[in-house]
Amino acid sequence: MESFSLSNDVLDKALQLLKKYSLCDSCLGRCFAKLGTGLTNAERGKAIKISLMLQLDYLIKEHKIKDLNEVKEILLNMKETAKEFYKLYFTDEDFKSRECYICADQLDELKNDFLKKSLEVLKSSKTKSYILGVKLSDYLKMKENKFVEENNLTYYESIKNEIKREVGKKLASLSFPPEMDSPEMEVLYDISSRTIITEAQHKYYLYFFNRIKRNVPLVNWYSKDGKSLENAIQVMPTTYFSEPSEVRIFDEYYILLKDYDRDYIDLPIGYVLKKGGIISKREREALLQIKPSSRTYRVVVYSPQNEPVGGNKLAGNFYDLIISAKNYAELKEKLKDYQIVAIDLIDSRGKHKSVVSIYLKSDQNA
Ligand SMILES: [Zn+2]
C-alpha cells in the first residue's frame, strides 16, 4: 500500500505571502482559516511561522540557501514571532517590526474596542436577542478583496467573520450569547468611526394560505381592480411558488410576511391564512430551492366536439377533469384543445410538503 508523503503546499503558500507582505499572526492564519479546526487564526498563523522558521533554519544549516538577505526579509515580515530567530543570524538592533499589511496591527485593538462597546450597549438594552455585525471601511474592504484575489486564497476567512466570531465568543462567555436564528437587533460595529449602531431586525413569518376566490392575486402588481392580498393586509408577501390569480388554491401553499404577526386571518376578499412560524435567514434561503414537483388541478372545460378522456360530464358540453401536471404552463399545454371554464389547484407533491408538516405541526395540535 502506498502512503502519502508530506507536500508543503501550505508552507509554500505562506512563504510566498511572507516574501511579499508583512503579516501578523492572525492575518496570516486567516489565509488558511478553513484548514484545521479548534484553533484561533492567531494560533494558526503562529504555528505556520514556527514551521517555516524550522524549515528555513534547516535549509541554512544544510547550506541550501545562498543569500541570507532573502531570509532576513521574510523574518522581518513575520514580525514579533520571528524576533528571537532573527537574532540567531542577524543583529538584534535592526529588527524593526513592520506594520501588518492587512490590519495595520489594529486587529486586537478593534476586537477589544468592539467587545467593550457592545457590552455597554447590551447591558443597557431591553432585548438580549442580538446578532453582531461589522462594517469595514471601504479602504479595508478593497484591500482585503484585492489581497484574496491576487493571492488566490481558497481557504481565507474574511476579517469581518473573524472579528464577529471572536467577539461573539467573548460576549457569550460573559452571559450575552448572540442569537443566530432570529435576533431582535443587530449590534453593528463601524470600523471607520469605531462606533456601535443598533438596528432592529425584522421578523419573517411563514404563512400557509388558501385562495378561495378567483382573480385576487397575492401582490398588487398583478391586480386589475386593486384587490389583492397585499392590499388587504398592507404587507408585501414573498412568494416561492404560486398559481395565476384565476386559479383557486385549495392545497396549502405558503408565503412569507415581514413583521406581520397574526395567528389566523380570514379575509373577505378570498384568502385564509394560518401562521406557521418565524423563519430564519438560513431557512429563507433554503426555501428558495423548494418547489412542488407536480400539481393536481380540477378543471372545468367546455367541449362541444368530443368528450374529454377521463372527463366527468357536468351538464351539456361541460366536463369536470382531474389533471396532474408539473406546473400551470404544462397544464395549459395539456388543455390546449379545450375551452377552459375554471381551474382549481387541489393537490401538490414535492419537498414543500415537508415544510408544511414542519411548520404547521403546532397548528394541528391546537
Ligand atoms: Zn494583521
Image (cartoon, grey):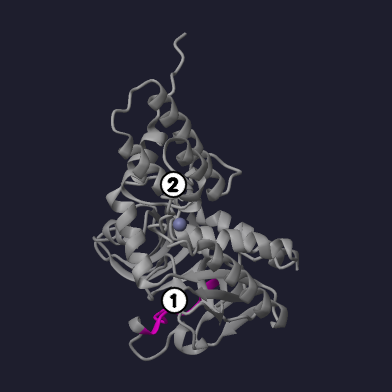
Kind of residue at badge 2:
Met
Q: Is residue 327 above or below residue 70?
A: below
Left or right of residue 341, residue 268 in this image: right
Q: Is disc 1 placed on a helix, strand or loop?
A: loop
Q: Position of residue 309 (x, y in %)?
A: 34, 52
Magenta stretch bounds: 208-220
Question: Does residue 219 show up magenta in the picture?
Answer: yes
- Quadrant housing residue 333: bottom left
Judging depth in this view, the residue of 112 and 92 nearest the camera is 92
Disc tally is: 2
How packed is label 2: few (under 14 Cα within 10 Å), some, or many (20 or more)?
A: many
Q: Position of residue 1 (x, y in %)?
A: 47, 8
Q: Is disc 2 placed on a helix, strand or loop?
A: loop
Left or right of residue 365, residue 230 in this image: left
How packed is label 1: few (under 14 Cα within 10 Å), some, or many (20 or more)?
A: few
Ligand 1 occupies quarter: bottom left
| Residue 125 can be seen in this image | yes
Q: Which residue is mark 1?
A: 192
How would you classify the magenta stretch by its main secondary structure? loop
- Quadrant housing residue 273: bottom right
Of the residues under marks 1 and 2, which one precedes in the sequence? 2
Q: Position of residue 163 (x, y in %)?
A: 53, 62
Q: Which residue is mark 2?
A: 78
- Residue in view at x 46 percent, y 84 percent: 230
- Residue in view at x 46 percent, y 52 percent: 24
Query: Which quadrant of the rendered structure holds the C terminus?
Result: bottom right
Left or right of residue 56, residue 261 in this image: right
Question: Does residue 112 show up magenta in the picture?
Answer: no
Q: CA distance from mark 1 to mark 2?
A: 26 Å
Judging depth in this view, the residue of 258 and 181 nearest the camera is 181
Q: Is residue 197 above or below residue 58?
A: below
